[in-house]
Amino acid sequence: MSPVPPDVDLDRVWLGIAARVWERRVSRLELLAGRVLRSPSLARALLTTPSLVWGWVIATVVILAVGATATAETGTPYLALCAPAVAGAGVAYAYGPGVDAAWELSRSMAVSDRMVLLVRALAVFGLNAALGSVASVAASAARPLTLGWLVPMTAVCAVALGAATLSRSANAGVATGLCGWIITVLGGWAANGSMTTAVTSDGLTALYVVCAAAGAAAIWISTRIPGAIT
């Protein structure tokens, strides 16, 4: 590694980067989040979540809209099959090096990594659950089916985030969550001849609970030491 030229002030460069990321007008949404969370820095971290930017949210809406349309046209709940996968990817990309533009700065805050991760993950999950519910209503989906996809969505999100924090890689988390969900869907299809078994079978609820608990344990272990997510 070549030495830094004597005429380059790295501290000044870093301050410039910090200014570009953090120095902006505080929106009403951020003020509201700051009051709710009782932490302006945590509110800023929440609103810089990679999977809550407008581009990602619009992409999520489009995917769920396509799933809702397919559900309404065919009667097959494709929306219920898409929602857990979309939510799992969003949660895995909520926080981490190489994903979060404010990663280095967020690690210098007084708020712990675990708290930032928890708030961001819950926000992404809540948004996806809300969008999925709206799409289900728009597709005239059966009301019990909403709970049917919320349970596996929770499990997929927990597994994806747990894998992401343990591996220090959002991509690894997404791959783990999606592969697990695809295997579950295909396994149900092979066993019962129906793709919807993964979201309609009560027998899989225990499996989803175990997977969610395992993911939560992985998250807890990987974030038990402040600054452990590196």
Image: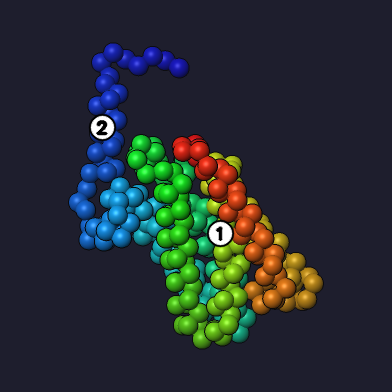
Looking at the image, which residue is at 50% across and 83% down? 139
Q: Is residue 108 left or right of residue 15?
A: right
**Relative to 194, residue 211 above or below:** above
In percent of width and height, residue 39 lies at 30, 51
Look at mark 1 in the image and give the residue it sits on.
Answer: 157
Looking at the image, which residue is at 43% across and 66% down? 127
Q: Nearer the viewer, residue 222 or 173?
A: 222
The amino acid on which the numbered mark 2 sits, given as a three-letter code, is Leu
Looking at the image, which residue is at 58% across and 72% down? 149
Q: Quadrant of the N terminus?
A: top left
Q: Residues within 10 Å of mark 1 (few under 14, many from 20)?
A: many
Q: Nearer the viewer, residue 114 or 155?
A: 114
Disc 2 secondary structure class: helix
The amino acid on which the numbered mark 1 sits, given as a three-letter code, is Cys
Mark whose residue sits in front, 2 or 1: 1
Question: Which of the marked residues, 2 or 1, is nearer the chain's N terminus?
Answer: 2
Q: Residue placed farthest to the left in the image?
A: 25
The picture quadrant where one finds residue 36 is: bottom left
In percent of width and height, residue 217 lies at 60, 51
In percent of width and height, residue 51 lies at 43, 55
Q: Is residue 102 left or right of residue 63?
A: left
Look at mark 2 in the image and give the residue it sits on.
Answer: 15
Disc 1 secondary structure class: helix
The picture quadrant where one finds residue 37 is: bottom left
Looking at the image, which residue is at 69% across and 76% down? 202
Q: Is residue 52 left or right of residue 162?
A: left
Q: Which mark is residue 187?
A: none
Q: Residues within 10 Å of mark 2 (few under 14, many from 20)?
A: few
In percent of width and height, residue 35 lies at 27, 58
**Relative to 118, residue 196 above or below:** below
Q: CA distance from mark 2 to mark 1?
A: 35 Å
**Relative to 65, residue 223 above or below:** above
